[in-house]
Image (cartoon, rainbow, N blue to C red):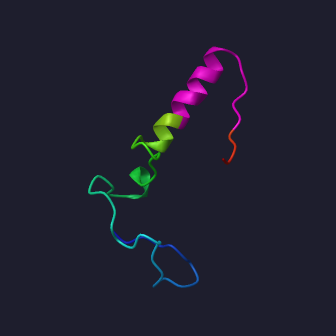
């Protein structure tokens, strides 16, 4: 898999280089939480719960 880290310098790699988990096969499954959960699945679950309880969802950087 080729990962573009810097559009202006295609030779640049992320800080961890090409040392990524085997389960990552495309950008669609590249983002995981620190405890190994798919980030988009976590976000979808949060949106579903917020909708179910009629609350706003807020995303903040820690």
Q: Where residue 17 sits in the image (x, y, percent)?
A: 39, 73
Single out the residue that lies furthest toward the left. Answer: 22
- 49 over 11 or under it: above or below: above
Tell me which segment is drawn in magenta: 43-58
Single out the residue that lies furthest toward the top. Answer: 53
Q: Where residue 4 sits in the image (x, y, percent)?
A: 47, 73
Q: Where residue 13 sits in the image (x, y, percent)?
A: 45, 77
Is residue 56 inside the magenta stretch? yes
Q: Nearer the viewer, residue 26 or 37?
A: 37
- 16 over 10 or under it: above or below: above
Q: Main secondary structure of the magenta part?
A: helix
Residue at figure coordinates x 56%, y 78% from the top left: 7
Q: Quadrant of residue 35?
A: top left
Residue at figure coordinates x 55%, y 77% from the top left: 6
Quarter of the picture containing the N terminus is: bottom left
- 54 over 22 or under it: above or below: above
Q: Nearer the viewer, residue 21 or 8?
A: 21
Q: Nearer the viewer, residue 26 or 46?
A: 46
Q: Where residue 3 sits in the image (x, y, percent)?
A: 42, 70
């Amino acid at each position: 898999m080729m990962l573009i880290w810097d559009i202006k310098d295609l030779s640049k790699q992320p800080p961890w280089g090409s040392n990524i988990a085997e389960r990552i096969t495309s950008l669609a499954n590249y983002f995981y939480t620190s405890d190994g959960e798919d980030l988009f699945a976590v976000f979808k679950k949060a949106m579903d719960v917020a909708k179910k309880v009629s609350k706003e969802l807020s995303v903040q950087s820690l």
